[in-house]
Image (spheres, rainbow, N blue to C red):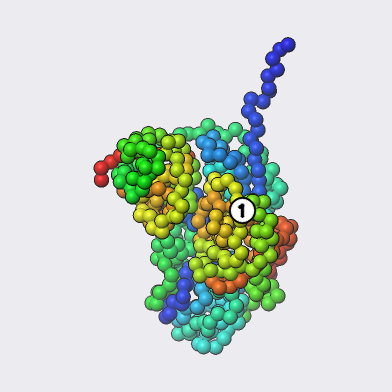
Amino acid sequence: MTEVLRVDEPGLFTTIQDLGRPQAVGSGVTPGGAMDRFAHAAANLLLFNDGAAPTLECTLRGPRLVAQAACVVAVTGGDLQPRVNQVSIPMWTSVPLAPGDTLSFGGRRLGARAYVAVAGGFVGDRWLGSMSTNVMAGRGGMRGRALTAGDALAAGESWRPAQPGRTLAEDLRPAYGDRSLRVIAGPHVDRLMPESRAALFGSPFTLDPDSNRMGYRLEGPLLEAPGEDLLSFGLIAGVVQLPSGGRPIMLMADHQTAGGYPLVAVVASAWLPVAAQLAPGDELRFVETSIDEALRSRAAQRAALDSIS
Amino acid sequence: MPRRRSTTTKARPRVRVYPLGDAAALAELGTRLDTAINTRAIALAAALKKRRDVRQAVPGHASVTVRFDPEQTSLEMMAAAIRRLATKRPPVEEPGRLHRIPVVYDGPDMDDVCARLNLSPQQVIALHGKPIYRAFLVGFVPGWAYLGPLADELVLPRRPTPRTRVPAGSVAIAGRQTGIYPLTSPGGWHLIGRTSVRLFLPDSDPPSLFRAGDRVKFFAASE
């Protein structure tokens, strides 16, 4: 384990993330992990890392990182305009850094979260089987918090040396610009009043300022789903729940583990990476799709990742 | 005429399986707060977790949320497996661990609760401390457990407006359930007391004092 990068400027909210800790959900601990699992896996695979290795999830305004040793990195996900020594670098591509090189970001162009992987994988504190940062508990990743200036980032051993210039073909990258999220009707969709159902699957919704890794609060037409209170059940990322106030909430990676609000829709798994690239103020629509269609998209995404390794 | 006896002594439990997107399902075993159904939900989640095509299985009050690998199975196959496992008689449940929790019954809602239930504080304390509760579900926030069922005399709907800040250790009631806030957080339950017992144990694994199926008894303490 060697120090490869030093944090010069931490960015808005940069955290170490892997695939989270799903087994901790039974204790009420959020599963966490990378919001955009496609970008996370792709960044690792471009470097011959295990697809589950920790990466840096950079939110809206990326960090400035200075290489402490020769290393190879890949930046994927939302386009926050990555640069090395102030020169743009291609995304979804492995890029070599020499000691002293600076990796920085110009600003948000498309999407909300960029992922930085390093050959060998970033190494953070392990908590309950995962190095993902859990800010609420103050555990995992970089001492349970977002990066701050001066942090030293270490990488593990590469089992196969990374090659600069490996890239994911452009047509295999997610269409982050398409904000019509494909969803499958949820278990309690029949509770919706007809007008509310039409509004859910037809009207635009806007992420309110209180939208984050826990979930997105959506502003739009108020939806009504009257009925008896439900007993609490386990929740997963991508469910759209409807509290009594009528404003839907889409749960994301750091979601609460259980709840009892009606679940009116569930984002298709292949569209979670697109959902992960939304930020407060962005607009989205829910487009109903079938499970078969969702599985076809999922298989295509899987094949795109397989094309890297 | 001989009295006809049914050969099946118990009706087959009805399980409804709903898709949760393309890679998960919600298996509903019932719609009531019921110890037997909850026991079956916990057993079903444990049985599902052992399957290779299951990524995660979390018991709810009367349900199991299961994430599966659609490359290894389909919703239909998973639903069939769920129905098969759910109709199996659950293993005789070992009694959950018993936790005895000291409570100082001086919560900010105690007077309001007494007024609305037409009970004295002593009666509320006696009714709340009498049963051995079951931890139906651990979740929502780290270490939180839904405990119940609560005595009928203590049943109240949630507060119409949740508090934005409920201190950690607050002992609360709502509906037919009681619980302890593990962390300072927003909350809409009625606060009747507080405890110094820590529920979220981040440096233990599992990190929660309570596990689903555990038993919990409260007793009045002075500081």
- Classify A168 as above or below A262: below
Q: Circle 1 is placed at which residue position?
A: A225
Going by the image, does A59 lie left or right of B86? Answer: left
The residue located at (67%, 72%) in the rendering is A178
- Tag count in the figure? 1
What kind of residue is marked 1?
Ala
Q: What percent of the width, then of the height, locates residue B122?
A: 31, 37
The residue located at (69%, 72%) in the rendering is A172
**Closer to us: B35 or A172:** B35
Q: Residues within 10 Å of mark 1 (few under 14, many from 20)?
A: many
- Classify A81 as above or below B7: below
Q: What percent of the width, then of the height, locates residue B62?
A: 56, 42
The residue located at (66%, 48%) in the rendering is B18
Residue A306 appears in the figure: no
- Classify A56 as above or below A140: below
Going by the image, does A277 lie left or right of A156? Answer: right
Q: What percent of the width, then of the height, locates residue B205?
A: 43, 51
In the image, farthest residue toward the left:
B222
Q: What percent of the width, then of the height, locates residue B2?
A: 71, 12
Q: Quadrant of residue B150?
A: top left
The residue located at (34%, 35%) in the rendering is B123
In the image, farthest residue toward the top:
B1
The image quadrant where one finds the N terminus of chain A is: bottom left
**Closer to us: A281 or A39:** A281
Chain of the residue on which disc 1 is drawn: A
**Closer to us: A130 or B75:** B75
Secondary structure under tag 1 reads loop
Going by the image, does A202 lie left or right of B133? Answer: right
Residue A267 appears in the figure: yes
The image quadrant where one finds the C terminus of chain A is: bottom right
